[in-house]
Amino acid sequence: MFLKEYISEVVNGVSSLLKGMRKTGYYFAHPKEIITEQYPDNRATLLMSDRFKGEVVMPHDENNEHACTGCTACELACPNGTIKVVTKFEVSPEGKKKKAIDALVYRLELCTMCNLCVVACPSDAIKMAPNFEHSVFDRTKLTKVLNQTGSKIREGIE
Amino acid sequence: MFSLEGITTYVQDWLFMKFNPTLALAMECVIVILLAISLFAILGLVLVLMERKVAAHIQIRLGPNRVGPGGMFQTVADTLKLIMKEGLVPDMADKFLFNLAPFVVMMVGMLLLAPIAFAKNFQIWDINIGVLYISSVSSLSVIGILMAGWASNNKYSLLGAMRSGAQIVSYELSAGFAVLTIVVLTGSLQLSDIVNAQQNGWWIFKGHIPAVIAFVLYIIAVTAETNRAPFDLAEAESELTAGFHTEYSGMRFALFFLAEYINIFIVCAIGATLFFGGWMPLHIGNWEAFNHIMDYIPSSVWFMGKTFFLIFLIMWFRWTFPRLRVDQLLNLEWKYLLPISLFNLLLVAVIAILGWHF
């Protein structure tokens, strides 16, 4: 009985080691499985995952219009004061006053990419971009205004 | 056809023609020493690069790929860096032993080179107790490791050295038994006899299953003896920083590093000689035509091919298996490998006496 246990232990040990060697041997023999990205060389073809959070951007459409209503929900949601919404009042042709953004100031150096502002936004005006090359020589360049100059809010978004 | 034997004969004839015998012998010694040192340097560079590349590909990485085409000169650059680094000696260390230890480890590697047959009739010293010489000299390397651990005045180094001592002393046994099986089959301790006995087939094929078991035991034991993962308890970087060479830097560290790879090469060369016929081409019984075609591949290529295959096997082990604990390590040797190798030796003795091998 003892001998049987002993032999089965040896056989089990050897077979499990061989199973591991089969896996690593497969990886060795199949170089196409390699997952290394040769980053600075493949910058042109580099594919980042969709959920990668690199910085907050505000998408604009071809008419230079965005979806931000200036509700400051993102500013309130931000845990470390990264976003500052500067609002102004626009007067429409009918003489009605409407709240709009003058500048959505985003300070990248304070941002922790927590995604809370994107979640808080009621009109999906901001989103996370997969860009991660943020290094600059001057710290002031990290303070960005997200809305483009001359842009206005898209029709039909309240 | 290319053969190293022709070159050595030519050089020897030329030396003995030009100079008197004593001077010629001295010059031959110098040539052999130079060749051995350059072999060590080249092996160090090639094996470290090979290890890094094999490791990378096994772990789905690319490995070194910046210095030279495909990272070919990475190890050259590393060696240059190590040469230029300062070799620190700890304040309270035993200076003499601390400086001596890497050279002891290195010297063992050099001594082991002597009886290895690199190609047909290309051997430094065809000693008639070759296998005994190898097993006795290879156990000396533990002295260098203990010396390094003890002289460093560092608890990690000491622990690593002690572990290495326990490990080498135990695994020497099953390595010895595995080697003995081939000695029993051949009936000679001389390496050239062992190679010649494999004229009509390598021992791993001729010796049936016991030879295969002996080969597996041999590979496990020498992996432990060279202190490589999964038996790298002497280094155990996660527990003991770097074990016995924690305090070493610069060229002294490089010598330890080199000695590790030289030892791998030597144990694999011996394994190839014993089980895979050394420089003997693949011969199958009396298939004359097949044997003749195989003879066209130079014997040095056969030897290097087999040796590097075994080195690859050991590297494959290293990057696949998890490290053992000390008690597991000693359990494996004393409860599993030793009884199996004793039984295996008995089996081989029966086979040899009854002449059941081919």
Image (cartoon, coloured by chain):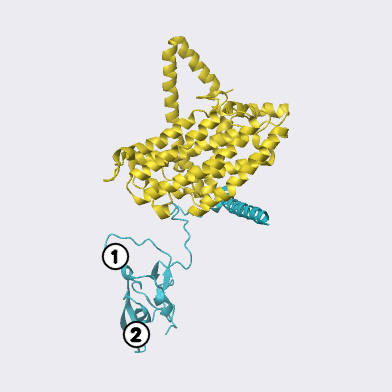
Q: Residues within 10 Å of mark 2 (few under 14, many from 20)?
A: some
Identified at 64% across, 43% down, the residue is B343
Specify the chain shown as cyan. A
Identified at 34% across, 70% down, the residue is A111
Query: Which of the two residues, B266 or A157, is positioned nearer the viewer here?
Result: B266
Specify the chain shown as yellow. B
Q: Position of residue B78 (x, y in %)?
A: 38, 42
Query: Which of the two residues, A90 or B257, is positioned nearer the viewer here?
Result: B257
Query: Which of the two residues, B1 or B280, is positioned nearer the viewer here?
Result: B280
Query: Disc 2 marks which amino acid?
Result: Lys
Query: What residue is shown with label 1?
Result: A141
Q: Quadrant of the N terminus of chain A?
A: bottom right
Q: Chain of mark 1?
A: A
Q: CA distance from mark 2 to mark 1?
A: 28 Å
Q: With respect to residue A28, does B300 lie above or below?
A: above
| Secondary structure of the residue carrying numbered label 1 | helix
Query: Disc 1 marks which amino acid?
Result: Lys
